[in-house]
Image (spheres, rainbow, N blue to C red):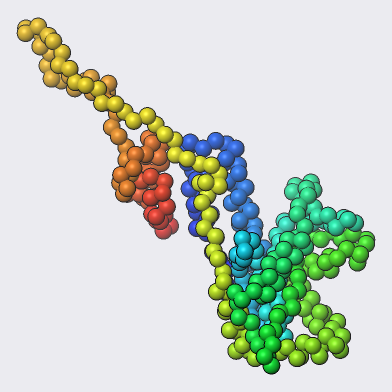
């Protein structure tokens, strides 16, 4: 059963594309924004592929609960967990989803590298990253922040199991001493997740099986526990302007010149048309937001005017632009 779907990141991508279109940001900032967009899109593809295999297998199941995209905060620490798989034996598979277009490589020291255009570059260990998530979950379950199932008067703490999920199209280069590196066998491709879980079950010894059976809970209790865990989700609202240090350019406030009537000979008074011709030398008109009346720059105004279909010919400051949706294609 699916308890929680993944968060839709399209709004973030739309906001980043809006920042990318600003005429006053430098090329370095544009490169950083473009890279962030690519990272979000790549992450979405990886998580979507993993979610497809999970949803296909367990959507109709009452013995397994699936939680996608869970962000937890506890005692000042944060864990952004891609997927959780919960079963009636109080086992929770904590899944970290990674999408590396050209694959990953692990050396004999357990150090990870990814590839871009054929060249390798070092990356943080996804094993350690997932261990961080598991540790936070353990602390959460040790606290009173979530109600655990109780059997015979004893709280039943879940068993947490790590899985690192890699895109099906990516290659995984493992070292020869793979068995000596802890956690390396938990790195699999998305399409292998069901086989990996079945193998875990087959590898349990008789004592583990007895212990698992003694912890079994009803489907209703499992669903209630999963829903309580999903309710702890704390969505992150990104301030992308602050992230990239983007501020609207400040232009000097025009000072209205004091009007002085020219002194002219009575017989040489110039016609009114000539006075109007001098209008370009007068103080420029103040540009302001049609919604909040905040002063905006000419560049922001031109951006709004060039997007007439969206802003209906009006001028809005950046903050107010965010509340106006793009017209449907």
On the rendered structure, is 169 left or right of 225?
right
Q: Quadrant of residue 288?
A: top left
Q: Is residue 54 above or below residue 329?
A: below
Residue 188: image quadrant is bottom right
* Residue 35 visible somewhere in the drawing: yes
Tell me if I can see residue 314 in this picture: no
Q: Residue at x 59, y 51 (%)?
A: 37
Examine the rendered structure and indicate whether residue 161 appears above or below residue 320: below
**Residue 34's spot in the image, x, y percent?**
59, 46
Depicted 11 relative to depicted 258: above or below: below
Q: From the viewer's side, name the closer residue of 101 and 236.
A: 236
The quadrant of the image that shows the N terminus is bottom right
Residue at 62% x, 47% y: name it: 35
Relative to 76, 298 lies left or right: left
Give the x, y percent position of residue 229: 60, 75
Is 141 or 219 nearer to us in this picture?
A: 141
């Amino acid at each position: 059963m699916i308890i929680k779907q993944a968060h839709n990141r399209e709004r973030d991508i739309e906001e980043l594309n809006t920042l990318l279109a600003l005429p006053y940001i430098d090329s370095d900032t544009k490169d950083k924004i473009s890279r962030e967009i690519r990272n979000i899109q790549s992450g979405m593809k990886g998580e979507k592929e993993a979610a497809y295999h999970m949803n296909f297998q367990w959507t109709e199941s009452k013995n397994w609960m699936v939680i996608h995209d869970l962000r937890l905060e506890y005692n000042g620490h944060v864990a952004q967990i891609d997927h959780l798989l919960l079963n009636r034996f109080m086992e929770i598979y904590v899944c970290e989803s990674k999408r590396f277009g050209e694959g990953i490589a692990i050396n004999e020291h357990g150090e990870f590298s990814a590839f871009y255009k054929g060249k390798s570059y070092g990356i943080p260990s996804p094993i350690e990253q997932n261990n961080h998530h598991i540790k936070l979950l353990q602390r959460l379950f040790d606290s009173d922040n979530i109600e655990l199932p109780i059997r015979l008067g004893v709280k039943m703490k879940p068993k947490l199991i790590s899985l690192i999920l890699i895109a099906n199209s990516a290659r995984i280069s493992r070292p020869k001493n793979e068995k000596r590196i802890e956690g390396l066998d938990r790195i699999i491709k998305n399409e292998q997740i069901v086989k990996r879980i079945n193998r875990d079950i087959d590898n349990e010894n008789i004592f583990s099986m007895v212990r698992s059976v003694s912890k079994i809970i009803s489907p209703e209790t499992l669903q209630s526990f999963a829903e309580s865990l999903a309710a702890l989700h704390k969505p992150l609202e990104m301030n992308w302007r602050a992230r990239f240090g983007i501020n609207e350019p400040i232009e000097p406030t025009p000072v209205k010149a004091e009007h002085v009537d020219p002194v002219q000979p009575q017989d040489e008074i110039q016609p009114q048309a000539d006075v109007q011709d001098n209008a370009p030398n007068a103080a420029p008109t103040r540009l302001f937001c049609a919604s909040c009346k905040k002063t905006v720059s000419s560049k922001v105004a031109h951006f709004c005017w060039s997007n007439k279909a969206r802003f209906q010919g009006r001028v809005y400051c950046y903050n107010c632009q965010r509340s106006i949706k793009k017209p449907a294609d």
